[in-house]
Amino acid sequence: MSTSPQHRPGPPDPRLFNEDLAPAAKRTWGTYSVFALWMSDTHAISNYAFAASLFVLGLPAWEVFLALLVGITIVYWLMNRMGHAGHRTGVPYPVLARASWGVYGANIPALLRAVMAVAWYGIQTWLASTAVVLLTLQIAPGLDAYNHNSVLGLSTLGWIAFMVMWGLQAALLTRGMEFIRKVQDFATGPVVWLVVLALAVYLVIAAHGDISLTRSLTGLSGTAQVQQSLIAVSLTVATFLTLVLNYADFARFTPDHRSYRRGNLVGLPVNFTAFAVVAVLVTAGTIAVFGEAIYDPVKVIQKIDNPVVTVIGALAFIVATIGINVVANFVSPAYDFANLLPKYLDFKRGGMITAVLAVLVMPWKLYSSALVIQYFLGALGAFLGPLVAILLVDYYLVRRGRIDVDALFSADAAGAYFYRRGYNPKAVIAFLPAAAVSASLALIPAFDAVAPFSWIFGMGISGLLYAFVTRRERAAAGAGPIPQDIIASQVRGEMVASVEEPERSGAIAGPAAASGS
């Protein structure tokens, strides 16, 4: 239950409110939906290749599993912390950020997240379109003549495939969050599991079971193995910081704390590690069967050289890419752009802006330049740690979970989150130096040794700075447990109140926010 502020906000301001940004009216994302959410995201070709590459670099399989398990367990803990805030307030990430950044200042972290998501949305769409080209040429080889010219960097067939993927995703994703939930529950999550499991079984049989998961492929020394394991732990967390930041976008739809906690548990430590096991098993199988380590599943499928396998595999990874784009690269910017101009932009219009910008950035050119990827996306990634830290320190230490949801939609100068002209200078003070340090460590060659850990420095510096500059607010908030109930709100014209019983809130899977924060 939130504390009652001295100033009671009036009706929601149209500059800050629309139905998509309001507290969730329906909470239909149960444990399985959250689990399917993580299947959609973790079953990415990039995650598969990451696990396989660690094995190829020389880490024994058991060390790969251990490093990834440690990393994803840290992610699990962070997701539960952010999920607690999203579930209780019922609002998406850019609205939740108003508590720490101000009702207008929240556009700063929201747009930083949106820029990154737009870039990756375009890249993932283009990568999926390459699978469409592969599928097309397998079915109609005569179309290869249209695959060798160049129009702004893409062939005619490449452009057609890209726009097919673009249009398919736009048609699916702009139908709203409930439709997205149903798609990921029954399609994008489970389908890749079926393909990679089939690959594993095929390769184990083809290798007659002669697959080693205990030796180092490169004879990596013990010290080097420890160093590589620590890097793997850190990069695993860094990869998921985008979703940690905007996890409220999904947790807001869960009916109780157990739904997101159990879904996180099965979908992250359990599912992610199991997927890594299969990825390493398939990679080890390629060494035994093909005489070389292949850690791109699409290339494994091509190597089998069977038209049926190629078609099924290409379709599976097309579906998988849609799932990844939904979770990691579409939902967040759709809300972020809607938050910019709520009076004119809702979730669907924000999503279409995301889709259009994803074409304009010409992702095939972006992805083809390692330098651009490193400096553009690397610099943006360095901002994620500081943004996550500010959000969590504000919710758990400064406010002790007590947020006035109605005030998040008030532009009244006397409002709780109006601060200075709608911006909180303390968040900016905490963010800028932390982001500068984190970006420097990530991008300057002299710091290559610590570059994989840059997010830790960014998160630590911003968290400590924000805790310091808000020490008076923390003292005023006092101590005590973090409340568990859904925060009541009247911005829809009706109360959105908790239906959880106290003992129900206490029966959780995973660490409790009250004791773990």
Image (cartoon, rainbow, N blue to C red):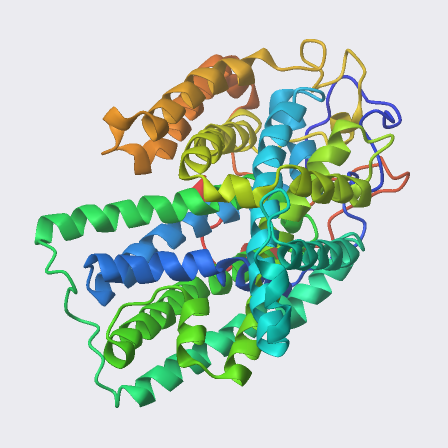
Quadrant of the snapshot with the N terminus: top right
Position of residue 450 in the picture relative to residue 198 (left or right): left
Q: Identify which residue is drawn at 77% across, 12% down.
A: 414
Quadrant of the snapshot with the C terminus: top left
**Picture coordinates of residue 4 (x, y %)?**
73, 26
Position of residue 79 in the picture relative to residue 285 (left or right): right
**Picture coordinates of residue 26 (x, y %)?**
79, 54
Q: Identify which residue is drawn at 76% across, 59% down.
A: 172
Q: Identify which residue is drawn at 44% across, 22% down.
A: 435
104 or 408, which is in the foreground?
A: 104
Question: Where 421 sits versus 41, above or below?
Answer: above
Specify whether residue 377 is in view: yes
Position of residue 452 in the picture relative to residue 410 (left or right): left
Q: Identify which residue is drawn at 56% across, 64% down.
A: 131
Quarter-wise, where is residue 30 in the image? bottom right
Quarter-wise, where is residue 371 in the image? top left
Specify whether residue 31 is in view: no
Question: Where 401 sits versus 204, above or below?
Answer: above
Residue extending farthest top: 420
Question: Where 412 sits versus 136, above or below?
Answer: above
Position of residue 463 in the picture relative to residue 225 (left or right): right
**Picture coordinates of residue 328 (x, y %)?**
58, 49
362 or 492, which is in the foreground?
A: 362
